[in-house]
Amino acid sequence: MKLTTYTILGLLTFYALVMVTSAVGIMNDYLLRIINLMMINIILGVSLNLINGYTGLFSVGHAGFMIVGGYVAGFMTTLLFGITKDTPYWEALPLFLLAIFAAACVSALVGFLIGLPVLRLTDDYLAIVTIGFGEIIRVVFNFITFKKKIGNWELDIGGPRGLLGIPPLSNFTIIFLFTLFTVLFIRNFVFSRHGRACIAIRENEVAAHMMGIPITKYKVMAFVLGSTFAGIGGALLAHFIQLLHPTMGGFMNSVEYLIIVYLGGMGSISGTIVAAVALTGLSEFLRPIGELRMVLYGILLVILMLKRPGGLMGQREFLFLLPERERKIYATQNR
Amino acid sequence: METFLSQLIFGLQRGTIYALIALGYTMVYGVVRLINFAYGEVFMIGAFISFFLVNAVSLPQPILVVLALLVPMVTCSLLGLAMDALAYRPLRQKPRLAALITAIGVSFFLSNFVSYSSGETVRSSAIAAFLLAGILLLYVLGVKYLNFPVKASPNFKPMKFVIPIVSLVLVGYLFWSARDLLVELRWKGSSFASYPVDRLITVEKIPLYKSVYITNIQIMNFLVSVILMVVLSYLVNRTMTGMAMRASKNNKDAVALMGVNVNRVISITFIIGTALAGAAGVLSAITYPRLTAFMGVQPGLKAFIAAVLGGIGSIEGAMLGGIIMGVAEQFAIGLLPSSYGPSRIDFTPLADGVAYAILIVVLLLRPQGIFGEPPREKL
């Protein structure tokens, strides 16, 4: 599916604006950091929306997949390739891309291994297992503290201390391109035949089964895709904040992504983008009140479900995100 | 053999705590099909309330033990009632996913609220727990029983007031009397609260067999949980309410047509479950006297897995599952090679993962659990 000229122009303008302002010095590092964080949260939110919003599953372990991707990529760049802060960027970049690819593959594999047995059962079990998965990840990464010399490399992913000294390879351009890729990929998936199958499963599983949709196949497909992009997001995040810690994969972090998805609207990419930007910005804005933010998140989740279960956007999309045919239908409906 | 026996005793003790929390999960799931993630937090609040009470009042030991157990149970059950009324009841007709998300929200809110209020020391998280209980109590009193704003209720039952008012007064008294304690605790400046076990009970080791011993805390633990479980079985199997509960498990609509107030049955389920979780919190605090705002997260998750292991929805299953879980975990802790032994690598951190390994095995081999029935698809 193609993007309209206006969308491309808009994206280019945004990219140029950020690049120019940060080069000139109008945009400071802090602001740029927030923008990067927003985009990483968009990747994680949109990929979770594919699982929870479009397919109607209930995964509570998104941060688990994120941390798996992060550890794989961080392990590769830091320990396997031995990239440090001082490595020239153009030498490090191909290796970084390779690491991101590996992170995506491993996350997909983990997602597949978890999804295949569990998604045959009723949806409650996915919530249970994904919570358990996040905890297992924490326990395992806490456990691996051994130091071993293999050739020139010393393998030590830190255990409870966390993986430190990851090179800062995620810059604005990389994150921007990956965010664009993620959003476009998931949009195209959602508006394809497979995406429709997923939405049908969300609306009524039995009816979808009657129509000949292989339910487990599509559930696993959505789950694996979501976890793949979570892995990519984790790899980017790891090289952005330069630190990985086992507890980052836990339940608490997953709830943040859940909030992004449900605030934005289940089954709306636009909503997720809006919510990711708003919540990341808000959490910076609310930094003075610190931990109270977490308290507010809990209340927010409850109130959202009670008062506005559809989220901010419901299932609506921004027009520029819709494919051409949908846009026409949309225009005629809302005339 | 001796190691085995003493590990078994410790494991059983651990297991009874899991079993008590798991009962709450399983009962609510049986009736409403809702996984109430907040039981771990109720557990934590129960422990804090008991901590506060024991610190605040000075009474003879036997009375204090009974109070330290009963007051948190009553307060926690009111918290459960409020939770149901505020967060879950409005969603009863909505898709189940909405209630599940709300449950996560409630759990997240409770633990973070206590954590936030605690700040650097835990002294004020006890206040937080109390304030929270107080606010929710006020809500329950106002909205549920007084039909707030003031409206004459046709079936006015005085007993409905007495228990909440008495507990509110009690909580208020505690809160009031604990102000001095707060000042005192502030200067101790530790990052967690330690439960004053010696005010409740003097720990004694009773030798059983060679080097195997059992402490009187463990005996108390077993006694309390056995009593609670017997009372629960009686309640569920022999009373009218229990019958309504079991019937609602099968078919809520039919039960409603028989003239049973299903909402009331659900509220009672919540009350029982949260009371048990509160009792578990107190027992756990006496055994492991270290309280933090997030102490409930792990036991909550593990108890939930125990409920799944036993077959979620089945009461016997939850008891058995909890005990299996506790024993398995204790054996993992006791038997995994640690760095003190001959092994160079410390394996004990992995003991924390035993519960989740059990979960995976159960889901692969018998997803409905030990006592559960395989789910049937209804059109």
Image (cartoon, grey):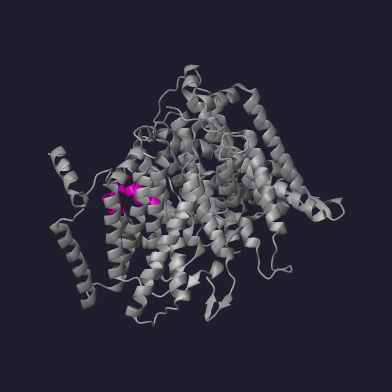
Could you tell me residue B3's position as x and y percent? 79, 55
Q: Is residue B107 left or right of residue B26?
A: left
Could you tell me residue B215's position as x and y percent? 78, 50
- Across the whole image, how many numbered discs are drawn on residues? 0
Residue sitting at the far right:
B210
Name the residue located 35 percent from the left edge and 45 percent from the top edge.
A53
Q: Which residues are magenta?
A: A257-275
As rendered, which of A112 and B201 lies closer to the eye? Answer: A112
As rendered, which of A260 and B122 lies closer to the eye? Answer: A260
Image quadrant in which the C terminus of chain A is located:
top left
Name the residue located 60 percent from the left edge and 25 percent from the top edge.
B242
Could you tell me residue B121's position as x and y percent? 55, 61
Name the residue located 70 percent from the left edge and 68 percent from the top edge.
B343
As rendered, which of A197 and A65 lies closer to the eye? Answer: A197
Main SS of the magenta part reads helix
Image: A12 above or below A148: above
As rendered, which of A54 and B99 lies closer to the eye? Answer: A54
Q: Is residue B261 left or right of residue B310?
A: left
Could you tell me residue A164's position as x and y percent? 48, 73
Residue sitting at the far top:
B258
Task: Tell me, yes or no, whether the highlighted magenta stretch contains residue B245.
Answer: no
Name the residue located 21 percent from the left edge and 49 percent from the top edge.
A322
